[in-house]
Image: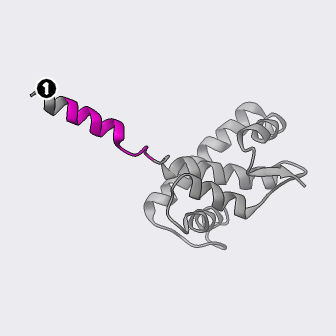
């Protein structure tokens, strides 16, 4: 029996690390686009978002799906495309948490915090 526990323990150690959940990425992308819009002198590079998705081991095309979902939700369906319900829910939660942070910190402090939080995703124009 002790060999069973040993084998189970070794399997846990050898298991690949779990990728971060997509919801974390959705929040990063939403905040990067919000910083571009809300914070003077801030820009982002789409390829940096794609690279981050790859680094997080997310499926190819995730960045475009997230971008379309954010655009759809934030324009009332006039831009972007509706995505699957799970992704739309993740965008809604990311929007709510970002709005809450912006109100709690104030826009200027939120923008300043994003320079650190989103380093590598946003930069000065």
- Spot occupied by residue 64 in the image (x, y as percentages of width and height): 61, 68
> What residue is disc 1 on?
2
Q: Is residue 113 magenta?
A: no
- Spot occupied by residue 107 in the image (x, y as percentages of width and height): 80, 39
- Spot occupied by residue 24 in the image (x, y as percentages of width and height): 55, 46
Q: Quadrant of residue 46?
A: bottom right
Q: Residue at x 73, y 51 (%)?
A: 121
- Spot occupied by residue 67 in the image (x, y as percentages of width and height): 63, 64
| Mark 1: secondary structure | helix
Q: Residue at x 71, y 63 (%)?
A: 47
Residue bounds of the magenta highlight: 6-18
Query: Compared with residue 80, is residue 100 higher up or lower down, i.e. above or below?
Result: above
Q: Where is the C terminus found, in terms of image quarters?
A: bottom right
Residue 37 relative to residue 53: left or right: right
Q: Quadrant of residue 78?
A: bottom right
Q: Is residue 7 magenta?
A: yes
Q: How is the image coloured?
A: one colour
| Outermost residue to the top | 2
Front one among 58 and 22:
58
Query: Compared with residue 17, is residue 74 higher up or lower down, i.e. above or below?
Result: below
Q: Residue at x 58, y 65 (%)?
A: 69
Residue 67 relative to residue 9: left or right: right
| Outermost residue to the front | 3
Q: Main secondary structure of the magenta part?
A: helix
- Binning the other alpha carbons within 10 Å of mark 1 as few (below 14), some (14 to 19) or many (20 upward) gives few
Circle count:
1
| Outermost residue to the left | 1
Q: Residue at x 47, y 48 (%)?
A: 19
Front one among 14 and 96:
14
Q: Where is the N terminus found, in terms of image quarters?
A: top left
């Amino acid at each position: 029996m002790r060999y069973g526990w040993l084998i189970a323990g070794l399997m846990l150690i050898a298991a690949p690390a779990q990728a971060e959940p997509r919801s974390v990425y959705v929040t990063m992308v939403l905040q990067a686009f919000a910083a571009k819009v809300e914070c003077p002198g801030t820009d982002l590079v789409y390829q940096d978002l794609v690279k981050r998705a790859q680094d997080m081991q997310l499926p190819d095309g995730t960045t475009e799906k997230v971008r379309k979902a954010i655009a759809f939700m934030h324009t009332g369906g006039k831009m972007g495309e509706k995505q699957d319900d799970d992704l739309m829910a993740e965008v809604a939660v990311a929007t709510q948490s970002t709005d809450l942070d912006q109100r709690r910190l104030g826009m200027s402090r939120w923008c300043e915090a994003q320079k650190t939080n989103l380093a590598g995703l946003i930069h000065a124009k």
